Image (tube, rainbow, N blue to C red):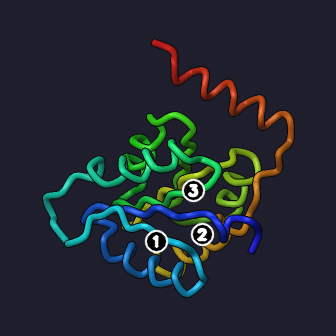
């Protein structure tokens, strides 16, 4: 795998992604990744995804070169919204379908958090998406770097 295998992966889910999170942790451990489970640590149908995914986002925000994040919820949309409120975080959503979009989020957007919609994909689809996302590197093209800087500047707009 490219250089991402040396990065620490922070992972979290709410109740909707709890079962899939456990399976993805097993997958990542087999692949040799360093993982930190940020919760939920038990199934609770009444839990709230911001409580867990914000912990992942904070870690990636504080250490964007050395870490990656995976967050899992029902659709993945709300989880990505939470993560993208943090500086240096570029969360992308995948909930099934064409896997080329996952590759593009890394090559063009340098996505450092992958948000998965557990209610819309199988375990196999999630593993495939995660594998592609982790094995794809950012292109480093000037146009993409320029765009990232503009996105970061927008986080300071009031």
| Residue 108 spot, x, y in % from top left | 75, 46
| Residue 72 spot, x, y in % from top left | 40, 62
Quadrant in the rendering for residue 71 = bottom left
Q: Is residue 27 above or below residue 156?
A: below
Residue lying at 42% horizontally and 53% vertically, measured from the top left:
56
Q: Is residue 19 above or below residue 80?
A: below
Quadrant in the rendering for residue 52 = bottom left
Q: Judge left or right: residue 43 versus residue 63.
A: left
Q: Judge left or right: residue 107 versus residue 101.
A: right
Furthest residue to the bottom? 30
- Disc 1 element: loop
Residue lying at 32% horizontally and 77% vertically, measured from the top left:
19
Between 15 and 31, the one lying in front of the other is 31
Q: Is residue 14 above or below residue 60?
A: below
Pair 2/1: label in front: 2
Q: Is residue 46 above or below residue 82?
A: below
Residue lying at 42% horizontally and 41% vertically, measured from the top left:
81
Residue 157: numbered disc: none
Quadrant in the rendering for residue 21 = bottom left
Q: Quadrant of the N terminus?
A: bottom right
Residue named by callout 3: 67
Residue named by callout 1: 121
Closer to the chain start, of discs 1 and 3, is: 3
Compute the Cα span from label 2 to label 1.
10 Å
Closer to the chain start, of discs 2 and 1, is: 1
Furthest residue to the top? 158
Contact check, label 2 and label 1, Cβ < 8 Å: yes
| Residue 3 spot, x, y in % from top left | 74, 65
Residue named by callout 2: 129
């Amino acid at each position: 795998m490219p250089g991402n295998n040396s990065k620490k992966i922070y992972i979290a889910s709410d109740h909707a992604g709890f079962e899939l999170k456990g399976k993805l942790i097993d997958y990542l451990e087999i692949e040799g990744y360093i993982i930190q489970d940020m919760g939920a640590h038990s199934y609770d149908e009444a839990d709230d995804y911001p409580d867990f995914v914000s912990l992942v986002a904070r870690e990636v925000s504080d250490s964007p070169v050395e870490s990656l994040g995976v967050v899992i919820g029902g659709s993945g949309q709300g989880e990505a919204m939470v993560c993208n409120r943090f500086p240096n975080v570029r969360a992308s959503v995948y909930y099934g379908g064409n896997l080329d979009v996952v590759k593009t989020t890394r090559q063009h957007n340098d996505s450092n958090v992958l948000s998965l919609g557990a209610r819309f994909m199988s375990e196999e689809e999630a593993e495939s998406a995660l594998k592609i996302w982790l094995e794809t590197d950012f292109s480093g093209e000037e146009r993409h770097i320029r765009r990232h800087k503009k996105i970061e500047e927008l986080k300071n707009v009031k």
